[in-house]
């Protein structure tokens, strides 16, 4: 009985580590796909990672919108601001399991700063907040 307890504890630690590694892997896949969608000015591909409702802030729109409304607003933004480059300046996470990214995009109409916040929902990371602001 004395040897069973340490084995159970070790097994529990291993499972927790495995779960965290899987979580990081899912986040990395989402980050890569989101970056590609932004670089391609592809609102539809980006919307795959949207939560049901998005806190969206764009130069001409600000509020909480449905996934479909957010996609349409981003399509409109990207149609007049084709992205020529996207660079991540900083990203990180919180203890509560949120991940954020801060970056810059360049378009034919100028430079913009971009910020988005993701949270894990089941086995997938979804964007809950997305901001594009004119850079001064």
Image (tube, helix red, strand yellow):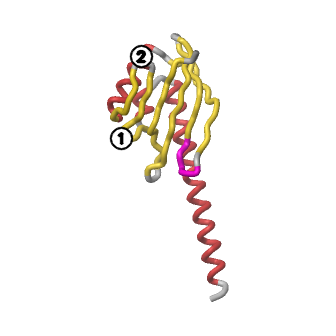
Chief secondary structure of the magenta portion: loop
- Residue, x 48% and y 16% (percent of image)? 82
Q: Secondary structure at mark 1?
A: strand
The quadrant holding residue 93 is: top right
Q: Position of residue 91 (x, y in %)?
A: 61, 37
The answer to whether residue 107 is above or below residue 27 is above
**Segment tinted magenta in the rendering:** 95-99
Toward the viewer: 135 or 91? 135
Sort mark 2 into few (<14), some (14-19) or many (20+) by Cα contacts within 10 Å.
few
Q: Nearer the viewer, mark 1 or mark 2?
A: 1
- Residue, x 62% and y 60% (percent of image)? 17
Closer to the chain start, of discs 1 and 2, is 1
Q: Is residue 84 visible?
A: no
Q: Position of residue 35 (x, y in %)?
A: 54, 31
Residue 43 horizontal side relative to residue 109, left or right: left
Residue 53 horizontal side relative to residue 10, left or right: left
């Amino acid at each position: 009985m004395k040897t069973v307890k340490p084995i159970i504890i070790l097994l529990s630690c291993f499972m927790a580590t495995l779960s965290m590694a899987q979580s990081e892997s899912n986040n990395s896949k989402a980050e890569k796909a989101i970056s590609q969608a932004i670089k391609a000015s592809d609102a539809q591909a980006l919307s795959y990672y949207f939560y049901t409702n998005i806190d969206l802030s764009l130069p001409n729109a600000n509020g909480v919108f449905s996934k479909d409304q957010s996609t349409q607003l981003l399509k409109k933004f990207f149609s007049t601001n084709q992205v020529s480059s996207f660079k991540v300046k900083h990203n990180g996470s919180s203890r509560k399991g949120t991940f954020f990214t801060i970056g810059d995009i360049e378009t034919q109409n100028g430079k913009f700063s971009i910020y988005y916040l993701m949270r894990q929902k089941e086995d997938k990371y979804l964007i809950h907040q997305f901001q594009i602001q004119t850079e001064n």
